[in-house]
Amino acid sequence: MPTRVDAPCQPGEVVLAPEIRQEARRLHQAIAAIDYVLPGTLSRRVVRCGRMGCRCHGDPPQLHGPYWWWTRKVDKKTVTRLLSDEQVADYQQWFENAHRLRALVSELEALGLRAVAADPRSLRRPGGRKPASPG
């Protein structure tokens, strides 16, 4: 649980507990260290084609592939692109970087929520009134 900061905030300046500032610095440094990112999902698939006499329809089936499929959203539509093994070797780290970036941004958002919860002004109700004390 973060230390409560009871000092009043000046307009435009939020007073943060030292551990929140330290954690934010760590997250900012980790985000700054990330290189290129690629959005979407990379999956390895084997497929059956549409030719009825093909080996992929045999018993047992011998499917085609494996193929690397990169799937992502572009303008609210799903877009899929096939990648070669060489491209996957080159871009794999970029997909991992995107995953790491999303995780770091989630941590930063959680830290922001902790900072708001620790703000002494968060105890007030709309209109500037303090909540009634119980009992």
Image: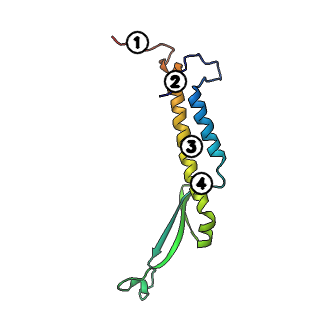
Q: CA distance from mark 4 to mark 3?
A: 12 Å
For label 2, the residue is: 3
Residue in the picture at 39% in, 82% down: 61
Q: CA distance from mark 4 to mark 2?
A: 32 Å
Is residue 34 visible in the rendered image? The answer is yes
Where does the image place residue 133, in percent across and percent down from the top left? 39, 12
For label 3, the residue is: 105
Q: Amino acid at mark 3?
A: Val
SS at mark 4 in the image: helix
Residue in the picture at 50% in, 15% down: 127
Q: CA distance from mark 1 to mark 3?
A: 36 Å
Is residue 113 placed above or below 58 in the rendered structure? above
Where does the image place residue 107, in percent across and percent down from the top left? 53, 40
Circle 4/circle 3 CB separation < 8 Å? no
SS at mark 3 in the image: helix
Residue in the picture at 50% in, 77% down: 65
Q: Amino acid at mark 1?
A: Ala
Residue 55 placement: quadrant: bottom left
Could you say which disc has been placed on residue 52 in the image?
none
SS at mark 1 in the image: loop
Could you say which disc has been placed on residue 132 in the image?
1
Q: CA distance from mark 4 to mark 1?
A: 48 Å
Residue depth check, mark 4 versus mark 1: number of the one nearer the observer: 4
Q: Amino acid at mark 4?
A: Asn
Circle 4/circle 2 CB separation < 8 Å? no
Residue depth check, mark 4 versus mark 2: number of the one nearer the observer: 2
Q: Amino acid at mark 2?
A: Thr
For marks 1 and 2 on the same chain, the one whose residue lies earlier in the sequence: 2
Number of other residues with Cα within 10 Å of mark 1, as a class: few under 14, some 14 to 19, many 20 or more: few
Could you say which disc has been placed on residue 97 in the image?
4
